[in-house]
Every structure is written in C-alpha cells, then in structure tokens.
Amino acid sequence: MENNDATRAGRHLAPGEKPDMGFWKLWNLSFGFFGVQIAYALQSSQVSRIFSTIGADPHDLSYFWILPPLMGMIVQPIVGVSSDRTWNRFGRRLPYLIIGALVAMIVMCFLPNAGSLGLSIGAAIVFGLVMLMFLDTSINMAMQPFKMLVGDFVNEKQKGLAYSIQSFLCNAGSVVGYLAPFVLAWFLPTTAPEGEVPATVTVAFYLGAAILLLCVIYTMAKVKEMPPKEYAYYHGIVDSDAKSEEKKEKVNLLKLLAHAPKVFWTVGIVQFFCWAGFLYMWTYSTDAVAIQAFDAPSQKVVESVSIDGKAYADKYLFNDKVMVLDNGRFLMAGICVDGEFTSPSTVVVDGDTIISGGQPVYVDGVAKIEPHNGSLDLAGRTLAVEGRIVEASRLETVSQFSLIEPGTVLTLAHIAKADGNGEYFLEDTSELPAVSAAESLDVNYKTVLNSASSQYQAAGDWNGVLLAIQGGVAVLWALLLARFRNRKLGYSLSLLIGAAGFLSICYIQNKYLLCVSYGLAGCGWAAMLAMPFTILTNALSGKNIGAYLGLFNCTICLPQIIAALVGGLILNLFPIVSEGASAGVANTVMMLGTSGVLLLLGALAVWVIKETSGEHAAE
C-alpha cells in the first residue's frame, strides 16, 4: 500500500501532513481484524461455557477472566514499544500480527478440548486456563498492529472513517464467531458426555483458526508499510532517518505516561466503567440466558462429606483407586450387578456404553441410567464389564453415598508431582470408614446449573445468537456514529442505550425479546470500539503512537482485572434464584444488570472528556 495519493493529486504534502486514502486502502488496513475478531468472539462467548461444562463453580468464573486482560496489559505495551522500533522486510507492525496469529491458531485447536483429554476436573480447568492465557496473549499481539496501522497511515480528517471501518469489520467478525456454534448445531450434535463441550463449539474454534489464517495472508498481500524515511516525513519527525532517531532516545513508558495528554486519562475513566461492564456480560451471559429464557435445570454437587465427624473434600483419581469427589462433582462409586458391588471404569450393554471413566454416560443431558437410583433390566441383553461378558439380569448404579451398602469401603486419593524426574506419584491415600449406617454420613451440597443438560447447551448456542445480534447492531450503529458531529454526544448516547439494554435483561424471560436487549447493548459496544481511539489518536504525535496505544490498552485490561477479582463477591450479594427449574443457583442475571449500571456511569463520565485537536499534544 503505497502512499502516492498526493502525487496523483498533483499536490506536494508538507512534512507531517498525511495524504488522503481511498476507501479500499482504508478497508485493507483493517480487514485482518475480521479474522482476529472471530477468534476473540469465540473466546468471549464460549470460554465461560467451556469452564462451566468442565465443572467450574459459577462463583469462580470471573476469576478465570483475570488472565486474558492481565496478559493484554503486559503484551500490548510491549508490542507497541517494540513495533515503534521495528523496521524489517515484513514491515513495522505486521511481524507481530504474524506471530500472534500463528500462536492463536494453534491454541484454538486445544482450548475447546480441555475436557476431552481424560484429565480430572481440576487438571482440565488448569489446562484450559493455560490455553486461555496463550490464546488471549496471541490475540492481543495480533490485534494491536491494526490499531497502530491506522495511526501510521491515516490523517486526522479520515481517522473517524478509518476506525469506523475497523469497528465494522470487528463487529462483522464478532457476528461470525458468535453465530458459528448455533449454525453448526444444524449439522453436529449439540450435547456431549458430562465434562466435554459439544462438537459445535470445538468445530467452531477450528473454523475460526482457518479463517484467521486466510485473513493474515490477505493482509500480508495487500498492506505494505512505509519505509523509515517516508514514515518520518509523513509524521513530521525531524530526523528523516527514524532508525537513528531511535538510537538517540529510548522510549521510557513512565515518562510517556507523565507527559500523556489529559484526554488519555479522561477517556480512561470512561473505559473503566465500560470494559468492567462488558467483562461481566462475557462471564455470566450464558448462565443468565440459561436461567432467564431456557429454565435450565439445577443440580446438587458435593462440596464435602463428613463421616463420623471427619470431613473429606476434593481429591483426585489415581490408577485403580475409586475417586468419590473431584472439584465438587460426584463420580461413580461403582455398580451393582445382581446385587454384587464392583467399581469398573467401563460398562457396556448391547454395545451401548453406560458408564465410561467411572461416570454415567449422558445423552441430551440425561444419564442413560439415572445416577441416584437407576437400574436396568438386562433380560436378553449382553453386559460387558471392563470388556468381559457378564451374565446378569439387573444392573444398578451406585453414585450416592445413601445408596452405598453397609460395609463398602470408599477410597480417596490425592496426586502430587514427584521432585526430580517430574513423574506423578500417589502422595496420600486414605480409606474412609466403612459406612455402617446412613446416620453416620453427612453430605454437604451446593446447587449449580446442570451444564450437561440439553437446556443449558441450547442456551449456550442461543447466547452466541444474542451476541451476534449485538455485534450486528454495533456494525450498523458504527456507521451512524461516524456522522455525529459532536463525538461526545454520540459516545454518551451510545452508552446510555447500551445500559438500557443490559438492565432490561433482568426483566425479560423470552429468548426472542432478549434479542432486543442485546441489540441495544450493541450500540454501546460500537462506541467503545471506535470513539476512544479516534479521540486519543487525534491528540498524539506519530513518533510514539504505538507506545501510547499499547499503554492505552491498560485502560481496557485493568478494569477487567478489577471486575474479575470482585465478580464473585458481587454475585454473592444477590439472592439466589428462587423459582423454576433453576431454583437454588446463583443469580447471574443480576450481574448483567450490574453491567447496565456500569455503562450508565460511563455515559456520564464521557462529559468529563475535553478533546484535543491535531497531532501535537504528546511527544
């Protein structure tokens, strides 16, 4: 992409004056954002669903969202400063796009499979968290170059249009990412064994990775960055050789912050409220939709067991030991075949797996044998236990302590990692006392949504539709925002509409009416993507624009970290759901109401901003 527009117009541009760019050149600068945003949409809409399906407590969900913004706050300033100093055959910003996109594509193939690798719940959650950390780090690395390219190429007059195009592509990518699991549900199974996400989610991540690859290839083919001398001329940098300029002065981030224009901080206040609000939407939206519109069933999971006054909590499975508890999930203690107790890992009836890995096999969220008191008549059927054909007439599952026969010994095991060679060993094994009577046993439960149920998984797919509607409305609203002469009015009005959308979710129980709520929220989302960067880059000089945009990303990440840290505490302030199939679970719907209050505060904070015109406010 050569900057020869001014030459064609027959007019010589003065140093520091950038030429006007045609629409398609502006489009090409941001097109790769489409692919990056598909990955980001899948992350924001499906990560809480993935962790809930694995078995995470809803009160802990917000904590999982600390890692993404934390990595963004670390990575984006580094990318900004480093790219300001980078000049090579691939360009200045594009090398970081290539690296980030490649890592993102690899991680997108692993994250949705966290619950399908045969790991315990705790280990699967840890694996998922590591994958989430790498995914968000790579997405941040791939996303930042597009923001910087607009600052590098586009003059002040066209920045509003450029960022509106970027917002359009961003939201278009979001729509694709959000809708993917819902559309794939027409062709693929929508449920999976307990602890595993459906194929609709897994395949959506695979497709997102493929589209991201194509977008990166397109960007590399269409965008050619300026060489150092040309960049220095168009940005009014006195030393025409940008490389020698960088040798003279190293960028000090603290010094840059000290000399940041006032608008950097005032826009940051608005950012705080807005991004905290949307963090709660991403975290709790699936559960809230499941409660409000799908009446997803609740279930009790075990927090601890007390036998003869001694409490036993979560432990992990090791080799042939029978695991009773794993992060609150009750696993199979065993089966009774014609009254004889055993604890196999697999049971097959007529070729149909009933128990796998010590757990009941779930179909559409319902165990083939009810785990509490289910039984199966085996007359005329073939029963295989651990691969051995067994002659029997009746099969009963034993997964509740109240059903375990007197004299049965239960085993709890704990895994620890050995020092030195890194192999796993059995650190502690303890046998619970033989259960002699039901009175000797006390089970402590907590109530959560049944994430393996068909209602919950349908809510997860519909949540993608709602977020896609939010993104679609944001696309259209972004086009209108570019026409607002008073940026602050457009900014504040958008956030007010978004606040109304979030608050209305608390009162709507029809899945189609929720489309209106999320559509209104899309107006706020459009303003959050376009307005802050337009206002800020107009107040920055070209020399350190990458560093400043990297630092400005902290106004996006820090609010999310703070919101994630207090999310569980805020959730505890609200009374539990009191009626319907979801009765007894944490009221995550009110967390979306909290998002509405935060956007309302952001709309008021907009009027604190005092815009600065021209590229002169920050060096």
Image (cartoon, rainbow, N blue to C red):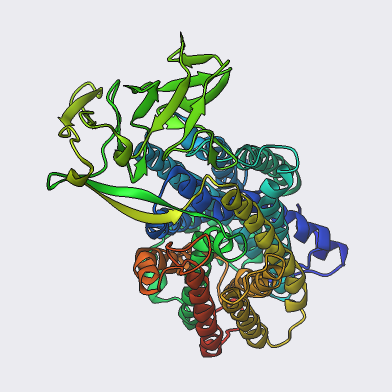
Q: What residue is rendered at 34% in x and 23% in y?
A: 343
Question: Residue 206's spot in the image, x, y percent?
Answer: 63, 37
Q: Residue at x 43, y 59 (%)?
A: 73
* Residue 501 picture quarter: bottom right
The residue depicted at 30 percent of the width and 35 percent of the height is: 324
Q: Does residue 35 appear left or right of residue 325 in this picture?
A: right
- The relative height of residue 167 versus residue 2 in the rendered view (above or below) is below
Q: Is residue 224 visible?
A: no
Measured as percent of width and height from the top left, residue 538 is found at 61, 76
Count how many numbered circles sit on residues in the image: 0
x 30%, y 32%: residue: 323
Q: Is residue 156 visible?
A: yes
Q: Is residue 165 above or below residue 68?
A: below
Residue 19 % position (x, y): 76, 67
Is residue 291 toward the left or the right of residue 428 in the image?
Answer: right
- Name which quarter of the figure residue 351 lies in: top right
